[in-house]
Amino acid sequence: MEQTSTVLETPVSTPTLAFRGKGSELFSIQIVNIVLMLVTLGLYYPWAKAKNLQYVYRKTELAGSPFTFHGTGKEMFIGFIKGLGIIAVLYGVLFFGVFSHDLTIYAVCVLAFFAGVSALIPVAIHGMMRYRTSRTSWRGIHMGYRGTLGSIFKVYFVNLLLTILTLGVYGAWFTVNLRKEVIGNLRFGNARFSFEGDGGDLFLLHLKGYFLTLFTLGIYVFWYAKDIINFYIDNVFIEQDGKYSRLDSSLTGAQYLKLALGNMFIMVFTLGLGYSWVITRTLSAIINNCEILGEFNPDELVQTEEEYKNATFEDVADMLDIGIV
Amino acid sequence: MFEGKFYNGRTSKGMPAFITLEPNHIHIVWQTDAESGTEVWLLPDIHQLEFNDATTVLEYGKFPRQSIAVFEQGFRQALEQQYRGAKFLSSKYNSFLKTGVKGLVLGGLCLLTVAVVLFFWGVPALAEKAAAHFPEDYEHAMGESLYNRVLEGYTVDSAKTVALQAYLDALQVQSDFPIRVTVVENEVVNAFAMPGGFILVHDAILDKMEHHEELAGLLGHEIGHVQMRHSTKAMARSLSHYMLLSVLFGDASGISAVIIDNASSLYSLEYSRKAETDSDKAGLRLLAQNRLDPKGMVWLMERLNSDEPEFLKFVSTHPRTDDRITALNAHIKENKYKTAPNPALEAAWAELKGE
């Protein structure tokens, strides 16, 4: 073969992030999803979700290459059924108690129900992270989640207890510690993530946001929300071969205001049909304002993570309304 | 031949590659500074391609997958020409996107129509269906909170309440719920039933009555509403959108709170014509069961008729009282009623009337 290396020589990729999804494209996917869900009385949901995620991932780019979501409707359907089973058992216990007409049985069942639901949250986060990360790849390199159920349980319940004891004040530290646990166990091939935020900083952001929102009759709420989003993003660090980099969000309050008001108008004036545009606008505002600062080299990732296909808690997390990623 | 990048699934390094579309496989020649190689991708092992844009990404094989990315150069058309009908090229979703703006707008409008129909017709109908299956305990508990809330706006006539309850106890009644009646001071000739067996009677209607059969008919009518769950259904219907919201936000306990907060809407609840006619028949049945004169129902209607202002007769959505009377008379004629004196009821009636 001839020497063509001069033609094919490519510069080292710069790690820019971009979201290139279009509302109209997502809408054309959603409309098929909605019709199929109506026809199947909602059973199509896991397939609909898979298509959505596949689209959104495909349109999210790092260094010019798209992410891929490998999850399938079938996997998530099996997960959906199992998740439904778990929730049904919990509610079964609750209703058994309610209709037992016996105060002791009632109390035991209600306690069991709440214990079950609160135990389910860390289990769901754990399961969802394992599934979601393993089914995400970029240039063929898969992400992964190395956390153990034991450690997330510990973090979750210790922090939950402290939050209850401090009447919610500890909530900011709870959020941060949970993120440290979850993001700290996140892998992207041989790159590892960590969350370096401080609970005190988040608490101060909430305090400042709360009072300024009050004083400005609510106008500050957009800057408040921007601060929280940037706090979550800016504190994510990536370690690759001993070199560190971090995410950095340049989202401004004015941009967030435009995004939030725009989304509201779209939802109101299209009677909710414009939801696809709301998603693509939100993702572009967040991802296109995000960059990686430091020495992260997107060309030197190495496959390290194993495959994991159990989607049970992907849907439980959905039902419990947990959205971390 | 196309130029692109090849990724081997082990590292993220994009390797410059030449890609050729052969009849039964895709041929890839890649090279880096250090090494080079060739790959043969058999068509059945290429993964389905969806949502590609200017860059076409294809993936191949088992975990970890190899992939190629090709920027434009007509690669996509070439794929479609060369491998028409191949599994990895098919996509329902892409085909809908190809319908363009017209298809999307049309699809959107159809969806909107379905949503509007479901929202204004489906949701209330569903709520009504659900209300018919509320557990009796729940309905009773809900009715009780509602009843307590409604009573806050009235003065209860306790002497008459006791007498009316005594009259009711002397009646033979069939109902899923324990019936509780309360007499309140109000000049409007009216009475209404709440879910779970709570009935409120204005004292004005009692004052107007001349025969105790009318009272039995009235109670029968209201118990009919309770038994057939008319008020529960009507409330579920009028509050269905609140209920939908509370279900959507996973707050099922919110439903009864919403219903109680909207207790005032009870006055404006409209029963359908059929609900009224059915309850009239329930009133007749109660009279028959207790061997009372079925004419009681007709007298009751005449009492209501005399009170109704002329203009209301045209606007009211209720069956017109005259029509109800005609229907009742027809019904009475069809069935043979045996009447017998009932001293217990008459005594309770005298107690109620004799102040």
Image (cartoon, coloured by chain):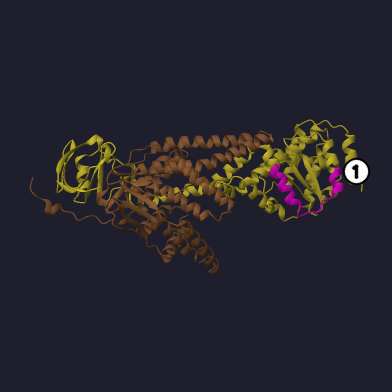
Chain coloured yellow: which letter? B
Q: Is residue A154 left or right of residue A185?
A: right
Q: Colour of chain A?
A: brown
Image spot of residue B265 (x, y percent): 67, 52
Span of residues in magenta: B141-163
Secondary structure character of the magenta stretch overall: helix
Image spot of residue B245 (x, y percent): 56, 49
Q: Amino acid at mark 1?
A: Glu
Any magenta on residue B144? yes
Residue that lies at the very extreme toward the left in this rendered image: A2
Q: Is residue A205 left or right of residue A281?
A: right
Which residue is labeled 1 in the image?
Answer: B351
Residue B276 at least partly seen:
no
Q: Is residue A179 above or below residue A135?
A: below
Count of numbered labels shown in the rendering = 1
Q: Is residue B283 left or right of residue A5?
A: right
Residue A228 at least partly seen:
yes
Any magenta on residue B148? yes
Which of the pair A163/B184 is nearer the observer? A163
